[in-house]
Image (cartoon, rainbow, N blue to C red):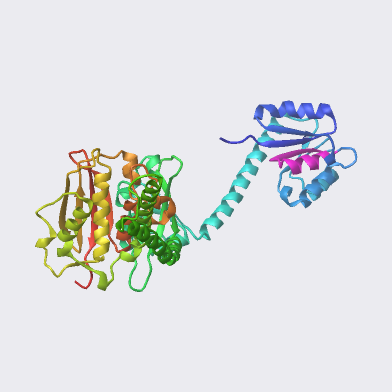
Amino acid sequence: MNQPSIVLIADDEPLGQETLAALLSPLGCHLILASDGAETLRLAIATPPDLILLDVMMPGMDGFDVCRRLREYAPLADVPVIMLTALDDRESRLRGLEAGADDFVSKPYDRVELRARVRTITRLNRYRRLVSERTKFEWVVENSDDGYLVVEANGAISYANPRARLYLGTRPEGDIESTFLDLAGNQYHLEPYTSWADWFGLPADQRASPRALVRPASDNATIFMLQVVLQQMAPDPRPRCLVRLRDISASVVNQHAVWSFQSLIRHKLSTSLSQLIGGLRLIERLDLMPAEGTLADILRIALNGANGLQADVDGIFQYIDAPALIGSVQADCPLVDLPAIIAEVDANLTITTYLMQDSPVRVPSNDDLAISRYGLQLIMGELIENARKFHPTQNPAIEIATMRDNDALLLHVRDDGLSLAPDQLAQVWLPYYQGERNFTGQVPGIGLGLPMVASMLWQIGGSCRLSNREPGPGVDVEIRIPFAEHA
């Protein structure tokens, strides 16, 4: 909503103040009254006005001196000043112009003329301020380290600052002919996949869903990731969206540094826990533990607590290890090992998974996946364990289907558990760049494993998506794992 114009009236006569206030009140201005030159300067500094109506003939400091001092004070130097005078001689007007006045109104006032001049000058001053602020804003955007684009409903780019052009690989100047998604898709993976479907027309609550443009790590470059934030612009005949691209690759590298630091303490924790658990188990095996009584209870509590702590520490370090599980040539996993990996996971979780007939055992054995065997085992374990964890009776019917998709393997893990609400589906694959908040598993209905699966897949150029199973209930998790390039 537009704020009313602030008009400062400086007149030493109360009748003069009342007359001007009555004339200007129909314009809806916010009026400030001053009775002398010193008060005029004080009030103008405290509340910078859009216009000053300044009486020439005031005691002490007259209107010419006040105007001169206003022009010498930088924050008020551009405020329009209309001088009110009963003097109609040429010399007085020249003095006013030399002092910095913008206009003159003679007493007695012509009501229509005074209102017209006030209305015109306040509008021009507001417009001048808007132009000034816009110039400052444009400078900030043009020199920003973030990329900014204005994207039309059809995907056309009507504006892109230099940083956005750099990120999308376009010419430094001139019109951009390709659409935003075409440019982004040529250089990056759009993650998470489900957040980009129909992205422009999404409702406001889903436009805030996490999105990223990811260039996977390679032999000579680390992962490059851009955080993408969408903001629907004010309604107008041409629906448009403001897109901000922020380089968060450093955040990923920093997180890896954190993981490296955490790995330094692994040995100390593991050694201490092993000694603790080993000692307690030795007491148990040597029949040194009392059969009953307080001491027996204390030893059992200590052993159970130590075992639980060991499991928690193992889980944390397993998660820390996730980025290292992306495949090098030495770590590639043969595709034919997938049935055995699933069988191992089933045995560890004491669950039965149905591997459908289009399993990868029919794919030539020389095809390898661009991820280590342990990494693939970890992914399958997380997906199968999630299916059990969120099943109403923890006894799901799980089926796994596979198919080749050009240079990658598509793998579906389907269960008959709970279906997810739309807001959960929109947030299920939390971006890797958001760090610790995601890793703690605070997203409703989603555990720690899914963000880890996403981070691993994105770094090797894979992808992941989750949808409700049709027909329900249950969910269908689809992951795409590239084949190793050497295969």
In the image, 272 versus 257, the foreground residue is: 272
Where on the picture, by quarter, is residue 475?
top left
User: Which quadrant is the C terminus positioned in?
Assistant: bottom left
Task: Tell me: 360 left or right of 116.
Answer: left
Residue for point 65% across, 30% down: 27
Where on the picture, by quarter, is residue 453?
bottom left
In the image, 263 versus 109, the foreground residue is: 263
Q: Is residue 349 above or below residue 44?
A: below
Please provide percent x and percent y for residue 29.
67, 32
Residue 429 located within the stretch drawn in magenta: no
Residue for point 56% across, 53% down: 137
User: Which quadrant is the N terminus positioned in?
Assistant: top right
Q: Is residue 432 above or below residue 474?
A: below
Task: Tell me: 97 left or right of 475.
Answer: right
In the image, 177 versus 395, the foreground residue is: 395
Provide the residue span drawn in magenta: 39-56
Where on the picture, by quarter, is residue 61?
top right
Tell me, yes or no, if residue 85 can be seen here.
Answer: yes
